[in-house]
Image (cartoon, helix red, strand yellow):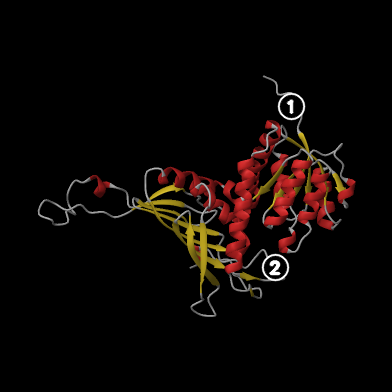
């Protein structure tokens, strides 16, 4: 059957992380047609517009509903010192569908949803990381495990820059957040780059270690990690080593006792035949360059396809709206528990492989 649906005319606002959106859109020609880029007119923005052969807008008022269906707002929101939320609301009030990059303050998120509803259009907050192949498979596997195994604890480490998507990852694993509560554990030493927050989500104990450091001159770098998560159950541990790493299933060690009460380490129990560790996802020989050229655009395609399906359905999902508003509240609650962000200077980083050692 021939698909007679016209591609959605789309504009990307911002040309830093926005370049990932641009690459993904280029691969979704049946769903989207790139018609413009909104930026301040920098050399990079001009080059992007030339590369993709589209109009470079330098003022949001140049964008009109008659020419644009969707806008991707890939500009920092107010809560992190940018104009993203202003752009999102301005575009929504024009009747243009909006995808906005995380993070967004709860009150601004609520305003965006209200303006979308008033203008009969769609608004979607993109946390991005859950669509990465590693994270997507981690979430899917965790949900399956928790259908048959009791959840005992969750351990998480992340950098402050990706705390918001971490909350979304946990919400997807646990099917929500309520009730939740957190408290702060003081740093053991002033040299500890991490803040520790402990608490509960839906009654399950959780411990978060958050690298609460920022280099003001290079805020996107100097992170020790993105996301590292352990889901501990009575059957075993599901471990995600990194957002771009390996997902491992490690069954708990269990040695049955014989009739005499002695541990039967040499018997025939099915527990003894369990693999000590299995790889759910193994990302081997991936370079950082391939992350930016392949893995991230592929993840963004999932996000954009989901949004395209939303607009086609013509139905706003009120449960998704409430979920994202609640996720914002959880993120802000944890953020408020953290100590003031530690300002760091750029470290000298040497690229090292195992062969170098």
Q: Mark 1 vs mark 2: which is more N-terminal?
A: 1
Circle number at residue 163: none
Q: What residue is shown at x 70% (from left), y 31% (from top)?
A: 312
Determine the residue located farthest toward the front in the rendered image: 179
In the displayed structure image, the side of residue 40 where residue 3 appears, left or right = left
Q: Badges 1 and 2: C-beta atoms under 8 Å apart?
A: no
Observer able to see residue 338: yes
Q: Nearer the viewer, mark 1 or mark 2?
A: 1
| Residue situated in front as seen by the camera: 34 or 213 | 213
Q: Secondary structure at mark 2?
A: loop
Alpha carbons under labels 1 and 2: distance apart: 43 Å
Q: Residue furthest top?
A: 1
Q: Tell me, for residue 5, which label it has, or none.
A: 1
Q: Is residue 212 left or right of residue 218?
A: left
Name the residue tied to disc 2. Answer: 218
User: Residue 121 versus residue 99: which sits nearer the camera?
Assistant: 121
Question: Which of 329/243 is in front?
Answer: 329
Residue 295 seen by the camera? no
Number of marks present in the image shown: 2
Q: 238 and 333: which one is in front? A: 333
Task: Tell me the residue at 74%/27% (across/down).
Answer: 5
In the image, residue 94 sits, relative to residue 207, either above or below, namely above
Identify the secondary structure beneath mark 1.
loop
Instruction: Bin the neighbour count of mark 2 within 10 Å (Cα to Cα): few under 14, some 14-19, many 20 and up.
Output: few
Q: In this rendering, is residue 191 above or below 55?
A: below
Point 67% across, 19% down: residue: 1
Where in the figure is residue 98, as x and y percent of width and height? Answer: 75, 45
- Quadrant of the rendered image containing residue 221: bottom right
Extreme bottom residue here? 190
Q: Residue at x 67, y 63 (%)?
A: 220
């Amino acid at each position: 059957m021939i698909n007679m649906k016209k591609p959605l005319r789309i504009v990307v606002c911002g040309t830093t992380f926005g370049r990932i959106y641009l690459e993904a859109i280029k691969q979704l020609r049946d769903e989207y047609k790139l018609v413009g880029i909104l930026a301040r007119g920098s050399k990079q923005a001009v080059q992007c517009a030339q590369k993709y052969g589209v109009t470079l807008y330098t003022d949001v008022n140049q964008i009109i509903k008659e020419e644009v269906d969707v806008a991707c707002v890939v500009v920092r929101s107010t809560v992190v010192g940018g104009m993203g939320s202003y752009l999102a609301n301005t575009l929504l009030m024009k009747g243009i569908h909006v995808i906005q990059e995380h993070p967004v303050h709860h009150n601004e998120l609520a305003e965006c949803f209200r303006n979308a509803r008033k203008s009969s259009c769609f608004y979607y907050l993109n946390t991005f990381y859950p669509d990465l192949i590693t994270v997507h498979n981690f979430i899917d596997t965790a949900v399956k495990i928790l259908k048959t195994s009791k959840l005992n604890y969750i351990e998480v480490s992340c950098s402050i820059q990706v705390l918001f998507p971490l909350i979304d990852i946990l919400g997807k694993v646990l099917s929500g957040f309520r009730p939740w509560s957190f408290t702060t554990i003081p740093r053991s030493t002033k040299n500890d780059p991490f803040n520790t927050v402990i608490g509960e989500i839906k009654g399950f104990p959780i411990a978060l270690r958050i690298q609460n450091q920022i280099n003001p001159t290079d805020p996107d770098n100097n992170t020790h990690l993105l996301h590292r998560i352990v889901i501990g159950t009575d059957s075993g541990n599901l471990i995600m080593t990194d957002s771009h790493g390996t997902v491992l299933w490690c069954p708990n060690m269990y040695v049955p006792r014989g009739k005499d009460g002695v541990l039967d380490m040499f018997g025939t129990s099915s527990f003894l035949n369990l693999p000590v560790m299995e790889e759910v996802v193994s990302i081997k020989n991936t370079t950082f360059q391939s992350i930016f050229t392949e893995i991230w655009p592929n993840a963004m395609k999932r996000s954009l396809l989901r949004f395209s399906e939303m607009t086609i359905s013509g139905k706003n999902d009120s449960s998704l709206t409430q979920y994202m508003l609640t996720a914002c509240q959880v993120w802000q609650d944890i953020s408020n528990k953290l100590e003031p962000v530690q300002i760091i200077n750029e470290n000298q980083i040497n690229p090292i492989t195992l062969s170098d050692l």
